[in-house]
Image (cartoon, grey):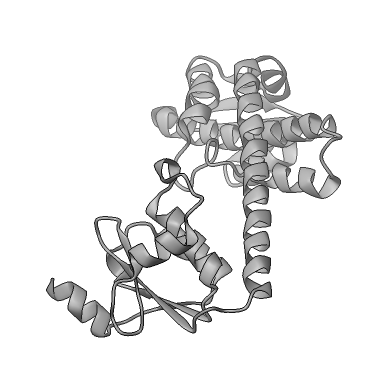
Amino acid sequence: MQQYIISTKKNYDQLKDKLLSDVVFKNDYILQYSYQSDQKKAAVDKLSTAIFEVIQQQILEDFANKYLQKRRDLSKEVRQDIYEAFTKSNYLLVDEGISCVSYYLLYVPILEYLLKNDYIDLDGWINFRTLKYCIILEDIIVQTIYDYEMHSEYIKYMEFLKHITDSKNSLEETLNIYCSSTGSLEIYDNKQKNVTTKYIEKYCQEIDFADMTPEDLIVTILIGVCPEETIIHNHAKYDNENFLQTLGQIFNITLCTGCDICDIKNEQ
């Protein structure tokens, strides 16, 4: 039998829980991990993964707490939201395996160290061997805050548009939007007549078309018309699902499952 000795006060309980069936508890801060001599690779893999998972979580939580405590410009609720988003960031955590950042800056150094040494001071490792990782973490938490603020602004903007449409009188009962797989969006009236150009000329006169997407034009028209119902045709072949979800947040949207407009367009 061979063994690894792991010294840690701060992460003792967490590591013990991950290695429960294979570890001997020497005292309140020393763990002894034993394995058969011919099973070293499997033992190193398991121990490296356990140590990695424990110290990554601690580093993320400690780093986020210290960084966000300095951001007094953010409310307590916002700091908590950012903390949750950061510690579960896709840059750092993945459902299966390890993200590239964590793999090369945390997991690989631990694995290489354990291949050559049978003793590791876990708390010392965190304090002195994770500095490069923490430098990357600052960039990631800055990006997390930016993403959070952009998402918050988006929500406010959606609420603003929703308020506008709810407070205006509907100029038409129904508006039909036909989606094509090429990305074009066309507006039809209830007589299956294409009225896209008509509506653009009426509601988009003050818009610089050079900077407008088809989706921008549709939103502008819908805000102007405020139809009681907007029916989306051929949505299954449209590749911008996020746009349809956005429309659903602002307007009363119905997804068509087949009608005369769909039949006519599909025959063309």
Q: Looking at the picture, how far across and down is residue 149, in whole percent? A: 68, 43
Q: Looking at the picture, how far across and down is residue 95, in whole percent? A: 48, 48
Q: Is residue 32 visible?
A: no
Q: Looking at the picture, how far across and down is residue 248, in whole percent? A: 51, 69
**Which sits in the foreground, 237 or 198?**
198
Say which residue appears at 59% left-offset and 37% top-offset. Answer: 53
Say which residue appears at 42% left-offset and 34% top-offset. Answer: 42
**62 left or right, relative to 240:** right
**263 left or right, relative to 55:** left
Q: Is residue 154 visible?
A: yes
**Which sits in the foreground, 211 or 2?**
211
Q: Is residue 9 above or below residue 193?
A: above
Q: Quadrant of residue 156?
A: bottom right
Q: Quadrant of residue 50?
A: top right
**252 left or right, relative to 11:** left
**Which sits in the foreground, 67 or 157?**
157
Query: Total marks drawn?
Result: 0
Q: Looking at the picture, how far across and down is residue 122, in whole percent? A: 68, 24
Q: Is residue 10 above or below residue 201?
A: above
Q: Is residue 236 above or below residue 184?
A: below
**224 left or right, relative to 148:** left
Say which residue appears at 55% left-offset and 66% top-offset. Answer: 223
**Which sits in the foreground, 228 or 237?**
228
Say which residue appears at 68% left-offset and 67% top-offset. Answer: 163
Q: Quadrant of the C terminus?
A: bottom left
Q: Is residue 130 above or below residue 43?
A: above
